[in-house]
Image (cartoon, grey):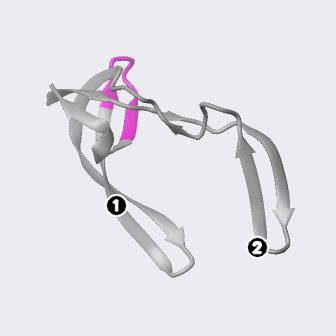
Amino acid sequence: MEKVLFKKWIRGIAVESKYDSLVGNTITKWKKGTNRFEDDFCNEGLFMGFGVDYEELNDGVGQYTNCLIRTNEGLIERVLIENVKFI
């Protein structure tokens, strides 16, 4: 197991949602600074291995690789590989 630094996802906080009939979907405005990854690698953990996750799209399923990180608190985080830095 190797030590890593990683960026966490900042959960989005919706401030306004409305249905746009022209586009045919809901448009959401997020509170500034949410619904994004942290700017810096400020969380420490241990790299446990790689995993695969998926997202359902209109054209089917899209798969992507992620890293499984054990935090200092003992929790397991799934982190996109571009948000992990080995130290």
Say if 74 sits above or below 34 in the image. Answer: above
Name the image quarter holding the C terminus. Answer: top left
Which residue corresponds to the image point at 76% horizontal and 73% vertical from the top-left? 23
Disc on the earlier residue, 2 or 1: 2
Give the percent coordinates (x, y) of residue 10: 54, 33
Q: Residue furthest front?
A: 22
Q: State the separation of the CA atoms marked 2 and 1.
A: 28 Å
* Count of numbered badges drawn on the protein: 2
* Secondary element at image label 2: loop
Tell me if mark 2 has few (under 14), some (14-19) or many (20+) residues whose alpha carbon lies within 10 angstroms of its own.
few
User: Residue 60's x, y, as percent?
Assistant: 49, 79
Please tell me which residue lies in front, 9 or 74: 9
Three-letter residue code for mark 1: Tyr
- Mark 1 lies on a secondary structure that is strand
Please tell me whether residue 66 belongs to the stretch shown in magenta.
no
| Residue 40 against residue 59 in the figure, above or below | above
Q: Are marks 2 and 1 in contact (CB under 8 Å)?
A: no
Residue 30 sits in quarter: top right
Report crowding for label 1: few under 14, some 14 to 19, many 20 or more residues within 10 A (C-alpha): few
Dividing the image into 4 quarters, which one contains the N terminus? top left
State left or right for residue 38 relative to residue 46. Answer: right
* Residue highlighted by disc 2: 23
Can you tell which mark lies on residue 80? none
Range drawn in magenta: 70-78
Mark 2: amino acid? Val
Residue 64 tag number = 1
Image coordinates for residue 77, horizontal then vertical, percent:
39, 36
**Viewer-nearest of discs 2 and 1:** 2
Q: Quadrant of residue 32?
A: top right
Q: Is residue 1 left or right of residue 45?
A: left
Does 71 lie within the magenta span?
yes
Which residue is drawn at the image coordinates 48% and 64% (left, top)?
55
